[in-house]
């Protein structure tokens, strides 16, 4: 399989320099970049989500950045559908698709496919949620295992969302969620992917996170949150999980000082980076792990005429 047919996937913890790395690779091999970060899709949150700026996007096509209004929902399924179409379009132009981001679920859906589970009516879903609330998680999880033994050891018994999802799927479709997953197929073969994960040591990453937090404040994160809050979204919206919104809102309400705000944002970002690393250890075992000191050397080696990009790792 030649270089043109490869799909390059670049992931790593937040603040690891993924976007910068992707741009350098794209310049070298005539690639186009596809966003694989579930928060960088939002139009109104450029600074807090560390979306690539105009300078970084100059001369390299970037797709699916800042194209969804925060008022709208956007699922992994929607991302996958758009991304598969875009990958095929880029390949037709004899260019190389480069997917970059920190959302593990996006990459997993692309590599393994996404289960096509039938839609479950909202009334039914609310009924299951109420059942979980009344039972409590421990009792509700035991109920799940009785009706769907295949769910055992598949996720943390304290994970409320996944327990509810597995329960509603089994009851409504009469099929285990894990049988649905087994039927799932990807649009691409595994050997079409070159999977790269930037592996930072914790101490260096902590410094980078604090520096990035300070930079965000300096270039306008406070004003961004002020504008965002005027939209008055419901709390349950997933966009509210963007790190920095809650902390900067408290600062704007004079509940905390700026230094404390920076520290709280940095702490939450470190916690998020830790969760990403945990995901990578369990779900990205086959990915090539690249230390920051190896990045420049890797970029020097890569060229479009290489027969197999795999040989460069």
Image (cartoon, rainbow, N blue to C red):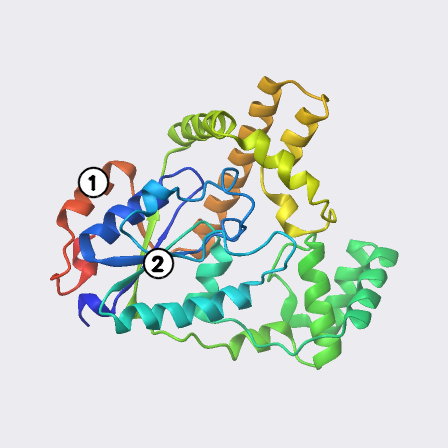
| x, y percent for residue 266 | 53, 29
SS assignment at label 1:
helix
Residue 291, relative to residue 302: is it above or below? above
Determine whether, in the image, residue 19 is placed left or right of residue 302.
right
Residue 24, image x and y in percent?
24, 46
Could you tell whether 266 is left or right of 191 in the image?
A: right
Q: Does residue 234 lie above or below 180 as drawn? A: above
Judging by the rendered image, the residue that carries numbered circle 1 is 296
**Residue drawn at 33 percent across, 41 percent down:** 55
> Which mark is drawn over residue 137?
none
In front: mark 1 or mark 2? 1
Question: Does any portion of residue 245 appear in the rendered image?
Answer: no
Please state, as top left, top right, bottom left or bottom right, where the N terminus lies in the image.
Answer: bottom left
Q: Residue furthest right?
A: 134
At label 2, counting other C-alpha atoms closer than 10 Å, the crowd grade (few under 14, some 14-19, many 20 or more) is few
Q: Nearer the viewer, residue 272 or 242?
A: 242
Q: Is residue 169 above or below residue 232?
A: below
Left or right placement of residue 271 versus residue 168 in this view? left
Q: Does any portion of residue 285 appear in the rendered image? A: yes
**Eyeballing the image, is 165 above or below 259?**
below
Left or right of 148 in this view: 279: left
How far from the left and from the top, in percent, is residue 228?
A: 64, 41
| Along the viewing direction, whichever of 76 and 55 lies nearer the viewer | 55
Residue at 45% over, 28% down: 206
Specify few, some or many for label 1: CA neighbours under 10 Å numbering under 14, 14-19, or 20 or more: few
Give the image quarter of residue 155: bottom right
Q: Which residue is mark 2?
A: 286
Residues marked 1 and 2 touching at CB (< 8 Å): no
Q: Which residue is depicted at the point 55% across and 56% down? A: 68
Secondary element at tag 2: loop
User: How far apart in space, not on screen, are marks 1 and 2 (Cα)?
Assistant: 22 Å
Mark 1 or mark 2: whose residue is earlier in sequence:
2
């Amino acid at each position: 399989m030649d270089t043109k047919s490869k799909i390059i996937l670049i992931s790593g913890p937040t603040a690891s320099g993924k976007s910068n790395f992707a741009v350098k690779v794209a310049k070298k091999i005539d690639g186009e970049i596809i966003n694989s970060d579930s928060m960088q899709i939002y139009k109104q949150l450029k600074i807090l989500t560390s979306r690539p700026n105009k300078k970084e996007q100059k001369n390299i096509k970037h797709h699916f950045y800042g194209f969804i209004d925060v008022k709208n929902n956007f699922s992994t399924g929607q991302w996958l559908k758009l991304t598969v179409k875009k990958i095929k379009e880029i390949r037709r132009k004899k260019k190389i698709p480069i997917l970059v981001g920190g959302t593990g679920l996006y990459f997993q859906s692309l590599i393994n496919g996404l289960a096509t589970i039938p839609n479950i009516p909202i009334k039914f879903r609310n009924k299951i949620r109420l059942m979980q609330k009344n039972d409590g998680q421990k009792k509700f999880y035991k109920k799940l295992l009785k009706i769907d033994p295949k769910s055992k050891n598949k996720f943390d018994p304290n994970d409320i969302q996944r327990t509810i999802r597995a329960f509603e799927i089994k009851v409504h479709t009469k099929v285990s969620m894990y049988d649905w997953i087994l039927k799932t197929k990807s649009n691409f073969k595994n050997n079409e992917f070159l999977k790269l994960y930037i592996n930072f040591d914790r101490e260096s990453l902590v410094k980078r996170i604090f520096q990035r937090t300070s930079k965000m404040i300096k270039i306008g994160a406070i004003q961004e949150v002020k504008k965002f809050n005027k939209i008055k979204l419901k709390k349950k919206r997933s966009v509210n999980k963007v790190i920095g919104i809650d902390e900067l809102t408290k600062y704007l309400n004079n509940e905390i000082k700026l230094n404390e705000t920076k520290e709280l944002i940095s702490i939450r970002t470190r916690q998020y980076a830790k969760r990403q690393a945990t995901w990578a250890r369990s779900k990205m075992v086959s990915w090539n792990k690249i230390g920051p000191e190896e990045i420049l050397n890797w970029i020097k080696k890569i060229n479009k005429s290489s027969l197999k990009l795999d040989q460069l790792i």
